[in-house]
Amino acid sequence: MLRPHVTTEDLYRVHPDLPWSQFATTTARGTAKYYSKGIDGVIGSDVTLPLAFTSATGAFEGGGSTDAWTVTDPTIILNIPERGFYAITEITDDDELTIDWLPSMTSIINVVQSKDYDYKTVTAGTALKYEVGGYADTLMQAYIDVCMELRKRKTYPSEISDNEPILNNCIIYRALSIIFNAQTQAIDDIAMYHARYYQKMYEKELQTAAPFYSGIDTVAPITWSRSS
């Protein structure tokens, strides 16, 4: 199944002017949107959601200080590129979160993975890269959009390799289009320009992206020559 190996950092690599100032950090908190990242995420065993997600460097409570973000904020979700997107239902302690399925997307993703509608099993893993908050919610929506577009084109995400990289740019461009469209205040302002530009880039990339390493073998091979 195609996975979104994309994080908030990838958006900044494409568009460096996205402001970091809108995000709080684990060391300097405030009213800004929460953002944290790590490379040591752990899911202990193959279990059914809800489950515990841990990180020795997580500092999910701000290193033990009073928490300045709340799990009731729908924009703060967990993005694990190798596993997917999850709701955060509880800050268990400084290095542990309780995560659960997202009603807005889990059923959709299960369908494109050719799994049962209510499938909630998550594969165990260690040294998982992750991010909490940031633009994870927008990346989730962009991922859904790409998957749905693939379905329309009769390319099924469930048949594409987990590590297929060719469609990551589609997710990045679609996410940037969503971000700038939300920031638009006037028809001809700079945000609208960026929104239109990245939407065009998304559509162009989607037209030319072909999953060469997907494992799909339904296309007839090209025969260069035949022996007489």
Image (cartoon, rainbow, N blue to C red):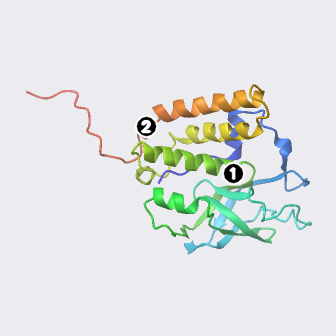
Under circle 1, the secondary element is: helix
Residue shown at the point (78%, 60%) measured from the top left:
73
- Measure how far apart labels 2 and 1 are at the Cα level: 25 Å
Q: Please tell me in which quadrant of the rendered image residue 53 appears.
A: bottom right
Under circle 2, the secondary element is: loop
Q: Residues within 10 Å of mark 2 (few under 14, many from 20)?
A: few
Farthest residue in the left direction? Answer: 228
Residue 121 visible somewhere in the drawing: yes
Farthest residue in the front direction? Answer: 187
For marks 2 and 1 on the same chain, the one whose residue lies earlier in the sequence: 1
Which residue is label 2 attached to? 210
Q: Please tell me in which quadrant of the rendered image residue 77 appears.
A: bottom right
Quadrant of the snapshot with the C terminus: top left
Vertical placement of residue 120 versus 185, above or below:
below
Coordinates of residue 104 in the picture (x, y in percent): 62, 60
Coordinates of residue 56 in the picture (x, y in percent): 75, 65
Residue 5 visible somewhere in the drawing: no
**Horizontally, is 196 left or right of 160 in the view?**
right
Which residue is label 1 attached to? 136
Coordinates of residue 105 in the picture (x, y in percent): 59, 58
Give the residue type at disc 1: Ala
Coordinates of residue 62 in the picture (x, y in percent): 87, 62
Residue shown at the point (56%, 46%) measured from the top left:
145
Residue shown at the point (64%, 73%) measured from the top left:
50
